[in-house]
Amino acid sequence: MNAVFGVIFHFIGGFASGSFYVPYKKVKEWSWESMWILGGLFSWIIVPPIAALLTIPNFVTIIHSTDAAILGYTFLFGLLWGIGGLTYGLGVRYLGVSLGSSIILGLSMVFGSLMPSIYYFFNQTAGKHGIDYFFTTHSGICIFIGLMICVLGVYLCGKAGMSKEKHLSSLSKETKSDYNFGLGIIVAIVSGILSACFNFGIEAGKPMAEVANAFWKAAHPGQGEFLYQNNVTYIVILWGGFTTNFIWCAYLLLKNGSYRDYGKPAAPKAKNFLLCALAGTTWYLQFFFYGMGESRLGNGASSWILHMAFIILISNAWGVALKEWKGVDKPTYRSIIAGIVTIIISIGVVGFAKTLEK
């Protein structure tokens, strides 16, 4: 049952992440940086401590008592992930929800799932799998096959995106205005690699989660692992992410004079604020539920792959629902649908792999 609940929690988290950018698309009269930093305040600064307070009342004490080196590495990976998250928004802007999310999250899935295992192969740690796990155990081989199937799904989505560029003349004016495949693909690659640093940050800050888990298990003996143990780690990671995004957005707000957006008479201020707050809060929920899924499946490759696969799946589904593929020919549309179906298959394979573990 742990595997089943783990997959369900990852699905909810993936749905939140795959959906968070949709409210941003409804913001009017504001520049990208104006809405991004406002939504980010909710994602990185406001919501995480509230979630931690509700689930780990002594989270401040845990952070204060954590070794400085652990906090430093966790914050550093948050900084690097922040660059990935920052460019994620630009990637989606230039490539659309479907293609942008597919490439970025596909790369993040591969790097985030395999790189920690390479580290643990050379630095063996109890409870952690090295890269050999994917080639010497039934469950590891199954997980690796699921990863490769998901990569195939990402490829099909990317192929559809390249074909989409050839049909720009028939696309809607709104979709065509921001679409830039050349610039978007560069941004997406950078974002995909650095976005994997969030998983590295979870690994680096795991001692904080373990303390929270130990406190909870002492108060609730025999009730398994603490579902919300990662909420304390998220706070430090997201401090790093906020730092990166705040510096860049502040630069753009001053450079472009877009700080004036907040005072534009034509802008629906209250509506825009609520949409940004909704987007930011929805974004955070992805990791809230990721932590719950990870507590059931373990913070290994399977959790990260499932999380990324569900995000890619939901993002592409939104792309179809938002008619980003309207006007393309049938082979292109079949390619995006095939990509979605392939990713669904990969999710089933990775989920099944957990049942093979002894």
Image (tube, grey):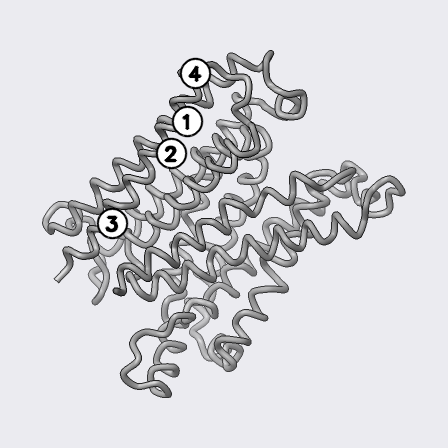
* In this rendering, the label closer to the viewer, 1 or 3: 1
Q: Is residue 85 left or right of residue 151?
A: right
Q: Identify the residue position indicated by label 1 in the image.
A: 336
**Residues under labels 1 and 2: Cα distance?**
6 Å
Q: Provide residue 165's location: percent of width, then percent of height.
A: 52, 17
Q: Are marks 3 and 2 in contact (CB under 8 Å)?
A: no
Label 4 amino acid?
Answer: Lys
Question: In the rendered structure, are the residues bearing label 1 and label 2 in contact, judged by CB atoms less than 8 Å apart?
Answer: yes
Label ID, residue 118: 3
Quadrant location of the C terminus? bottom left
The label nearer to you, 3 versus 2, is 2
Q: Is residue 224 above or below residue 129?
A: below
Looking at the picture, tell me which residue is in the foreground, 305 or 182.
305
Counting residues from the start of the chain, the first of labels 3 and 2 encountered is: 3
Residue at 41% across, 58% down: 290
- Residue drawn at x 21%, y 67% as measured from the top left: 126
SS of the residue at dot 1? Answer: helix
Tell me the amino acid under the disc marked 3.
Ile
Q: CA distance from mark 1 to mark 3?
A: 32 Å
Mark 4 or mark 1: whose residue is earlier in sequence: 4
Mark 2 is surrounded, within 10 Å at the Cα level, by few (under 14), some (14 to 19) or many (20 or more) other residues, namely many
Going by the numbered disc 1, the residue's amino acid type is Ile
Q: List the residue tagged with mark 2.
A: 340
